[in-house]
Amino acid sequence: MCDFIIYYYVRRNCRLPEAHAQFASRGGGSMKPCSSGPHKRFLYEPGECALCMGRML
């Protein structure tokens, strides 16, 4: 199984998590990555996305 992953840390109500990520980190990569890697994982944190909230107004 491929373990080449990019983790995106985003606020819970964000509508564009990849674009509005507060922080991104890479994980794994210790074995040969598959052809569809890197894989994306979104880790949601409490709070509101200021960028999405600005668009709602």
Image: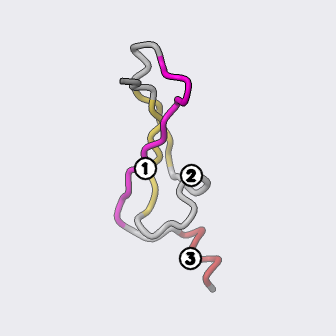
Asked if the residue under mark 1 is in contact with the one under mark 3, i.e. CB atoms within 8 Å, the reply is no
The residue shown at (60%, 68%) is 51
Image quarter hosting the C terminus: bottom right
Q: Tell me the tag on residue 53.
A: 3
Asked if the residue under mark 2 is in contact with the one under mark 1, i.e. CB atoms within 8 Å, the reply is yes
Q: What residue type is labelled 3?
A: Met
Give above or below for 26 relative to 55. above
Q: How crowded is mark 3: few (under 14 residues within 10 Å), some or many (20 or more)?
A: few
- Here the colouring is secondary structure
Front tag of 3 and 1: 1
Tell me the element at label 1: strand
State the residue in front, 31 or 43. 31
Earlier along the polypeptide chain: callout 3 or callout 1? Answer: 1
Give above or below for 35 relative to 47. above
Residue range (magenta): 33-46
Residue corresponding to mark 2: 18
